[in-house]
Image (cartoon, helix red, strand yellow):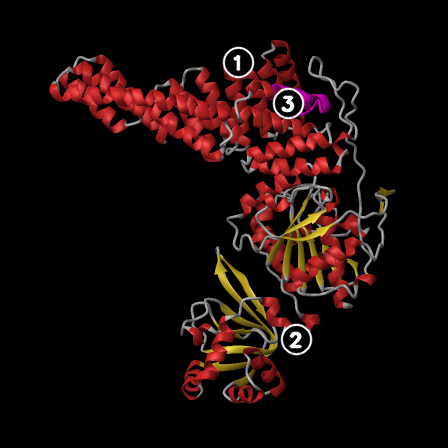
Amino acid sequence: MSKSFTTLFFEQAFMTASEASEIAGNFQCQTFLKDTVLFKEQESPAAFYIVKSGKVELRKHDSGRLSLVDLLVQGDFFGEMTLLEGKGLKATATVIENSELLFITGEAFVAITRKHPSLAAKILVFISNKLDVPARYEAFDFDEESYVLNKTIVISAPVSGAGRTFFATNFAKLLASHYKSDDPKTIGLVDLDSPFGISHLYFGVQGKSNFGSFLLELEKTDEQIDIFDYCTQVTDGVSLLQPPDDEMMNLSKGDVYQIIKSMKETFSIVLVIAPAGYNLLAQAAIDYADLTLIVSNYTIDGLARLKTYLRFLKDRPGYPDAFPVVINRSTSSRDARTREHDAISVPIIGRVPNSKLPPRSLKNGELLAHTDKKSTVVKAINDVVIQVTGLDCSDVSKDVSWLSAWFPFSQNKPVSVGSFPKADGVSTRGSFFRGKRGRSRLALGEALFIDGQYFRAFQELRRAIDDDPHLARAYSLLGDISLALGKKSEALDYFGAALKYDGDDYKSLAWFPVLKGDQKLLKSAVSRLELAISEHNDWADLYTYLAMVYIELGSYDKAHLNFDRSLKINPHFSVAHNGLAITFERENSFNEAIKSYRRALLSRKGNLHALFGLATLYESLALLGDSCTVLNTLVSCCPHHSLAQEKLMALHQRLEAVLQETGDLEAAVKVNPGFSDNLLRLGELYQTSGDFNSAVSAFKRALLANPDLLVAKERLLRLKALRQAMTS
């Protein structure tokens, strides 16, 4: 047993050399071969272990799969709960390479505590402070070349265009350069974004095979297949498994598990480029990874999309620590006076700025890559690699050829809006890119809007258009906020301004004529939206906007049809449920309207449109108590909703009068319990104040007193139907 190692280890517990020597004599040393299972999850470890050399994995069952808990290297220890509490570690410990371990049994430790109580106390204090992984391995002399904190890393993004492929390819090249290995199986990069994966373009290669071929071959045979045979070596130490590019693969979650499992068994480190957005394939990749990095950008709706994306990830194991964010192309936020962490609930571990070099693109099918070895891009990605893997690659980054590409695109949207507002000499071409600070504030404003922070969102969006008056999206969001606050004239102005700078802003295209009430504009909007749907028949919001126009035209059947189409695409689209409620209201189907409003609120609790609409409907049905309850919820969500505040005050005054009349009638009923008219009126008052049980009792008593009182039967049936609608 190496005395220098034990001395180094136990001096971390503030022991002297003689004390370290004393305690070391009680530890045993043994070599364990690869794949040895020290103990299983349901078992208690027989000892406290210290890794002298080699590696040990701790895994436990989580959501139906065996997930990595920790990777232990030289100087790490485990099984400490045996000493602290006499309990087992709820994980399976497996030696993943030949390892030399020091260990002490619980009985031997008890003997030490009796002989040297102060020595045992130092050990226990040291063990109980085991909190920070970097603090552990920095204190010991371990083989840094072989240490990797996370073996499988998924690179994910809320939406296409965030730069996850750019980030993943450079991440892979940097890791390969660190290892300086001739082994092509060092880094495995798999691009799951079928059929749109472009990782091979970043490397300037075209693979001969892909994971589609691998999965097809896997179905034909029971024999073991080497996934490496289906990869393309794109650079030293990096092999790429790319997606099929001819047709969309009908992948299942099981296929994703099989691909990543085969990659993990073949390569030292696996990087996975997940499909954009939150879908079954991205979910499967995230579930099977040791760590997920979210790459986002700070552009038009980067933070807003990210905010929504993070809500889906909250149910994934390890949230939020397993989902740090990398802000890509971050120079657009340089002038922002606000911080994106106001709207993001997970840590931002790195920023990758735009390259200062001129944009490069594909020319004659070949990628033009730059090798700016001293750029801030290199440093930024290296900083992320340090935090994710524990490897400092700064000394090898000078040898790395960094890849970056910009693909040509156009923002020229023709504005042919007929009688809609025109842009008075302002061209839409390039207006999206004017004003870095304006775009930054627009991004944060949209993130705050989605989070329901309307007052702060309104402030940021107003500042955005002060910086850049051509931001159509900002006007559209301001119109949405004004509409939610019941300020229809302001909303009309904002939606009109949005159409000036972007004639294809579909939300404004619908709401502007609806608020204006112009039949000619409404019919024009129908034709424009139907044309948009023919091009994008899977966009739920387009069907909803078209349905809102049909409501204003009085075509309720067509409105129902389009709301149904919208909800078929996205059953949780709160705006569609809200619009459906308005349609039912116009048709006097009040119970169905209540159900739709409640569905809208279940899909999005902070839906101000649904809250105000439901409160107004309850008021029209003389359910003042329930209307007050809903308005109280609305005001707590948005204290700046002045219309709701005014309505709430008026309802409280009306309720006071109702309660006073209720008290008088209760006294009258006590004097004459059989007078059905008083009982009928008392039931109505109870219903108005929200006391449904008392209302039902009063109506039943009225029927007992006068069985021929048809009004009481009608009120009782109506009340039961209302209760069912309000609680279903």
Q: Nearer the viewer, residue 455 or 200?
A: 455
Main SS of the magenta segment?
helix
Given the image, on which type of amino acid does mark 3 rest? Tyr
Q: From the viewer's perspective, is 189 left or right of 279?
A: right
* Quadrant in which the N terminus appears: bottom right
Question: Would you name the residue on which mark 3 appears?
Answer: 494
In space, the residues marked 2 and 1 are separated at their CA atoms by 74 Å
Residue located at (12% from left, 18% from top) = 672
> What x and y, as percent, mark residue 558?
53, 17
Q: What element carries label 2?
A: loop
- Asked if the residue at tag 2 contacts the one at tag 3, i.e. Cβ–Cβ closer than 8 Å, the answer is no
Asked whether residue 307 appears in the rendered view, the answer is yes
Q: Is residue 229 above or below residue 113?
A: above
On screen, residue 20 above or below 82? below
Q: Please identify, in this view, whether the residue under mark 2 or under mark 1 is nearer the observer.
A: 2
- Going by the numbered disc 2, the residue's amino acid type is Phe
**Which residue in the structure is indicated by mark 1?**
555
Residue drawn at (72%, 27%) of the image: 469
- Residue plotted at (14% across, 19% down): 704
**Looking at the image, is 299 positioned above or below residue 135?**
above
Q: Give the range drawn in magenta.
A: 491-509
Residues packed near mark 2 inside 10 Å, few (<14), some (14 to 19) or many (20 plus): some
Residue 2 in sight from this viewpoint: no
Front-most of 597 and 248? 597
Image coordinates for residue 17, horizontal then vertical, percent: 58, 87
